[in-house]
Structure formats: C-alpha cells, structure tokens
Image (cartoon, helix red, strand yellow):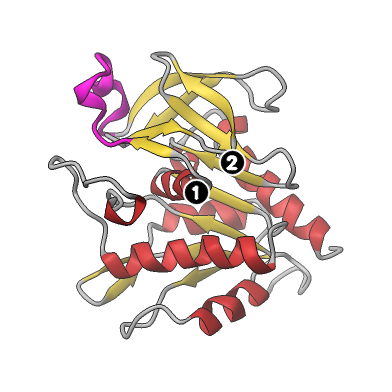
Amino acid sequence: MIMESMSEPVIGISCQVHEQRARVRLAYVDAVRRAGGVPILLSPPAGGVETELVDRLLELCDGLVLTGGDDPSMERYGVATHPAATVEDPLRQAFDEAVLSRRAAVAPDKPLLAICLGMQLLALSRGGTLNQHLADDVLTHADHLDNRVHPVVPEAGSGLEAGLVTSYHHQAVRDAGDLRVTARAHDGVIEAIDDPEQPCCVGVQWHPERTLTPGLGDGLFARLVRAAGARVGV
C-alpha cells in the first residue's frame, strides 16, 4: 500500500519478548494505523538495553505506545514481587523502563499512550505504587479479568468519557505518584492516569485496542497521533 503522506506521525509500539522473539498483537498496529499514524515496532537487542539505541529510537518516533504484558518485577521499586505474579521478561521490562526514563530525560513532551502494564510502569516511574493482586482486597476483582467488559467513570476535567472498556489484568495502580488519576472503575480501581502538564501523557489500565466505546478505544489512539503530529508540525 502506498502511504498517502510521508508526513504521517511515526508511532513506536513496544514489543513483548518471549523465547528470543519480539512480538506484539496486531490490534495495536491496526489501531495506530486507523488513527493515521505509521506504526513501527520497538524491541531491545538480545544482548541487553543500550541507552544510545533507546535515544535513537526516541528520535525516530513522534509518539509512543507502551503495550500490555505480564506483571512487573517489583524488587527494584523496593518491595517484593507478589507470589501470584506472572513476571514479565526482564529484558522487556528493562527496555520499557529505559524508554520511560530516557523520554523523561530528553523528550518529556513526546506523546505517550501507556496501556495496562505500560500504565503500571508509567506510574512506578513517577513514584506510584501498585496493588499487585486485586483479589487480595477487591471483591469484584474478577470483573477485570479475561477480557471482560466493565464501566469506567472519568474524573471531572479529565477529558475522558464514561463508558465500557475491555480489561485483562489482576494488578492495578494503587497510588499514581505525581500523576493525576483521571478515571476509575465501578469498584474504585484506578483505570486511567495522566500528566496534565504534558500535551499527551496518558496511561489506561484497560485495552483501548480492543475497546468498542469510541472515546475510550480508537479515540485514545487518535489523540496520541494528533498530539504527535502537532509536535512535529504535521
């Protein structure tokens, strides 16, 4: 297919790492493409995370999507990893953490959409904490599992709409650190966060790439691509 314009914003999408393979669900790629962005996949080399490579990738990308995955290892954040956790590949976690830290250092205004695990890592990078197992203290924890659909309620002034979202997580942000909480689930679980000082720095606990409510699904990718285009003058 011939691109309509060479000026379409380039959106980097982080990959999972599994058995020496980098992979991502095509739903993320399709969502970026529907929004008018050019999707490229971001992965660390097998030998480890390289700061220079991360910086170069940030230069190439006009916006970023940190995708979902398994659970973060928590020891580097000063707490033990919950025994019920399915721990994310350490190379992938280190890469996404490097993307967040280098973005903060060299391009803090670069548009970012952080999804599920991505939202959790974003919160941790900003001094937040996690509830590592909702089943420990949330009676309706099963509502968040297995791609179930549940309602979210936005906070006033968040710019989000109320609606139904598709979720697949057993952990959640407990405290958002210096970020703003912008939506909660029907049971009070934090579902969205942002940095109101940045043009587009958004984290959502649900999966917008498979959420049918427009403003909570494709609309989030459209917001990301618009912000990326505005930043580079497209």
Q: Where is residue 211 in the image (x, y as percent from the top left)?
A: 47, 34
Q: Where is residue 194 in the image (x, y as percent from the top left)?
A: 61, 38
Query: Mark 2 or mark 1: which is in front?
Result: 1
Q: Position of residue 110 (x, y in %)?
A: 69, 59
Q: How far apart are marks 2 and 1 (CA)?
A: 21 Å
Left or right: residue 173 compared with residue 223: left
Q: Which residue is drawn at 81% across and 65% down?
A: 232
Q: Does dot 2 land on a helix, a strand or a loop?
A: helix
**Picture quarter containing residue 10?**
bottom right
Q: Position of residue 103 (x, y in %)?
A: 61, 64
Q: Residue furthest right?
A: 233
- Residue type, numbered disc 2: Asp
**Mark 2 sits on what residue?**
218
Answer whether residue 121 is magenta in the image: no
Q: Is residue 38 visible?
A: no
Mark before the other along the chain sequence, 2 or 1 = 1
Image quadrant holding the C terminus, namely: bottom right
Q: Residues within 10 Å of mark 1 (few under 14, many from 20)?
A: many
Q: Residue at x 46, y 27 (%)?
A: 190
Residue 179, disc: none
Left or right: residue 84 compared with residue 187: left
Q: Does dot 1 land on a helix, a strand or a loop?
A: helix
Q: Which residue is drawn at 38% across and 50% down?
A: 68
**Picture quarter containing residue 168?**
top left
Left or right: residue 159 compared with residue 45: right
Answer whether residue 137 is magenta in the image: yes
- In this picture, is 17 found above or below 216? below
- In this picture, is 120 found above or below 43? above
**Mark 1 sits on what residue?**
122
Q: How many labels does the image show?
A: 2
Q: Give the range drawn in magenta.
A: 131-146
